């Protein structure tokens, strides 16, 4: 019998539509797989067994009634714990929201339901999506299915590990500085950050509102595109949502799979080709560039001189926005409350709650952000970082006058051992060296596996102009058609 957990999302949907398997069978197979391996991987913070089976039953009933259910009906999906799910715990990886059951669904989760997908549960993440390894989760780290002593990336390590461990064929992440693409890269899976505003932030617990972007994760490019299409598009409940349809990413992925890139011009970012990156990562990247050239793509070098300032600018802008966004966690409105014994003032309860509820990285960011926004320092730090953001956007705009998309490795290094980078925050921040410029600009970017270095997956990044998400899928699918997909050693 076919192992349903090894199929692609498109294959599962096909079997369900043809009546060759049921959504309930598919869901049960994934729940069994989670029960068998998640104790070792810890991709999930919460498994919604009953909710998943009920959703699956409803898909089967609707199919039996002859309803046309769309291209992902009956496919299980795991959702990063940063998105609100009605009645289902949503912690953002933090103690401060432990036990909170939101009264509403995020738009992404609502659209997943409308598409007939089956939500298996909520995945582990760095607290408030701040981190690159999932080690900053208040609920313990997630492990990389390729090597359980290594990190699965972050902040969406749970969503990526669930795919690589065959616990789910699809998952949802959020990308503020790389949290979809970097976990994708180090787990040998596909992760796409849509154009900012192309996917709704309604119900996404805010970290840095001008950067946060929910998006799809999958084990192959077409599945990612199908998921992207299902969750994307205008949402009147998000004031920064773009009032336009989702670019046709599914057709683009299919076109790319034919392996023909004639007429496509790709720019290798000069500034991202050496310093700070592992030789094995660069070797896999260069081989993939050659493979793309063989498919007909024209490859040129493009200098983006301000990309080198992206990391420092991001680490002022993101903490500044977070210091403001996280003010709402005060022990009054949601989740944890500490010290409310009738004798303490409101301020004391707030401060005890925040002291107990936030972990060290979140506190560090709040302090940096508050400092950068304070009146005497605003111009020198936050104001300056915003100017750098403009210069980075200009680099992208100029580059896209010359090329269709920019390419680089996704991360400078492969999955590192758990515990090896937590002592020095800067070492952790470096994981997003190549992903952050895109967030500051607002365009889309995708990470697709391109090879192995020392037996561990390497990610290839394709960055496209805003609202040209389809372009990156075409190139990603073409690359996948020559390098294939990557299967971790069996767990
Ligand atoms: N690793 C980056 C950070 O710590 C990006 C996180 C993200 O994209 N959510 O801020």
Image (spheres, rainbow, N blue to C red):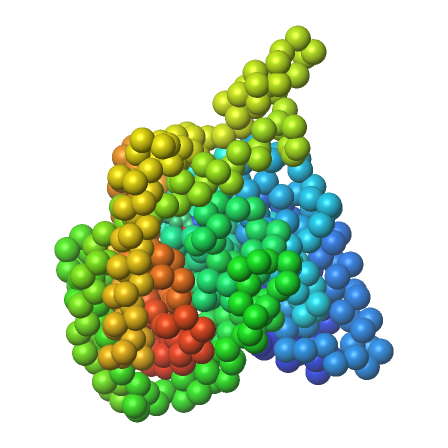
Residue 117 relative to residue 53: left or right: left
Q: Is residue 242 left or right of residue 342?
A: left
Q: Residue 76, image x and y in percent?
A: 63, 63
Looking at this view, is 238 or 428 the one in front? 238
Q: How many marks?
A: 0
Q: Residue furthest right?
A: 65
The N terminus is located in which quarter?
A: bottom right
Q: Position of residue 126 (x, y in %)?
A: 46, 42
Q: Residue at x 71, y 57 (%)?
A: 52
Q: Residue at horizontal 63%, vertical 24%?
A: 337
Residue at the spot 45% in from the left edge and 36% down from the top edge: 323
Q: Is residue 298 left or right of residue 196?
A: left
Nearer-the-camera pick, 162 or 208? 208
Between residue 140 and residue 372, name the one nearer to us: 372
x%, y% of residue 464? 36, 72
Q: Does residue 354 appear to the left or right of 485 in the view shown?
A: right
| Residue 458 x/y as whole percent | 30, 62
Q: Is residue 471 among the parts visible in the rendering?
A: yes
Q: 398 above or below 183?
A: below
Residue drawn where x is 71% and y is 50% of the image: 104
User: Is residue 420 among the parts visible in the rendering?
Assistant: no
Instruction: Note whether 84 is above or below 324 in the view shown.
Output: below
> In the current view of this chain or complex, which residue is farthest to the top?
343
């Amino acid at each position: 019998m076919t192992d349903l957990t090894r199929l692609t999302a498109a294959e599962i949907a096909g079997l369900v539509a043809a009546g060759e398997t049921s959504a309930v069978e598919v869901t049960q197979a994934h729940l069994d797989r989670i029960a068998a391996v998640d104790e070792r991987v810890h991709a999930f913070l919460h498994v919604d067994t009953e909710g998943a089976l009920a959703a699956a039953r409803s898909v089967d009933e609707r199919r039996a009634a002859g309803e046309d259910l769309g291209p992902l009906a009956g496919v299980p999906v795991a959702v990063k714990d940063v998105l609100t799910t009605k009645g289902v715990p949503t912690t953002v990886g933090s103690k401060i929201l432990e036990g909170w059951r939101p009264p509403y669904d995020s738009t992404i989760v609502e659209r997943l339901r409308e598409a007939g997908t089956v939500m298996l549960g909520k995945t582990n993440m760095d607290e408030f999506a701040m981190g690159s390894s999932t080690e900053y989760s208040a609920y313990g780290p997630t492990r990389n299915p390729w090597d359980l002593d290594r990190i699965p990336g972050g902040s969406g390590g749970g969503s990526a590990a669930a795919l690589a461990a065959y616990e789910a064929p699809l998952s949802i992440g959020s990308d503020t500085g790389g949290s979809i693409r970097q976990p994708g890269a180090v787990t040998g899976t596909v992760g796409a950050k849509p154009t900012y505003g192309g996917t709704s932030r309604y119900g996404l617990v805010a970290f840095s509102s001008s950067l946060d972007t929910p998006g799809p994760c999958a084990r192959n490019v077409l599945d990612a595109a199908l998921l992207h299409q299902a969750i994307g598009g205008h949402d009147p409940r998000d004031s920064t949502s773009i009032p336009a349809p989702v670019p046709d990413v599914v057709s683009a992925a299919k076109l790319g799979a034919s392996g023909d890139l004639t007429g496509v011009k790709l720019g290798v970012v000069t500034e991202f080709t050496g310093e700070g990156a592992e030789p094995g990562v660069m070797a896999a990247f260069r081989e993939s560039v050659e493979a793309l050239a063989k498919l007909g793509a024209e490859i040129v070098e493009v200098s983006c001189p301000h990309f080198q300032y992206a990391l420092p600018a991001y680490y002022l802008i993101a903490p500044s926005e977070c210091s403001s966004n996280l003010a709402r966690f005060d022990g009054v409105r949601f989740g944890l409350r500490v010290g409310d014994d009738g004798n303490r003032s409101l301020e004391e309860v707030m401060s005890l709650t925040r002291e107990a509820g936030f972990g060290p990285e979140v506190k560090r960011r709040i302090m940096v952000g508050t400092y950068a926004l304070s009146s005497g320092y605003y111009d020198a730090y936050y104001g300056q970082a915003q100017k750098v953001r403009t210069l980075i956007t200009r680099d992208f705009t100029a580059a896209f006058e010359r090329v269709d998309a920019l390419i680089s490795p996704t991360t400078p290094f492969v999955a590192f051992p758990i515990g090896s980078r937590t002592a020095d925050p800067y070492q952790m921040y470096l994981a997003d060296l190549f992903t952050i410029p895109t967030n500051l600009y607002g365009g889309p970017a995708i990470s697709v596996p391109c090879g192995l270095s020392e037996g561990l997956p390497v990610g290839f990044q394709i960055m496209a102009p805003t609202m040209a998400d389809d372009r990156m899928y075409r190139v990603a699918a073409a690359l996948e058609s020559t390098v294939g997909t990557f299967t971790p050693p069996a767990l």
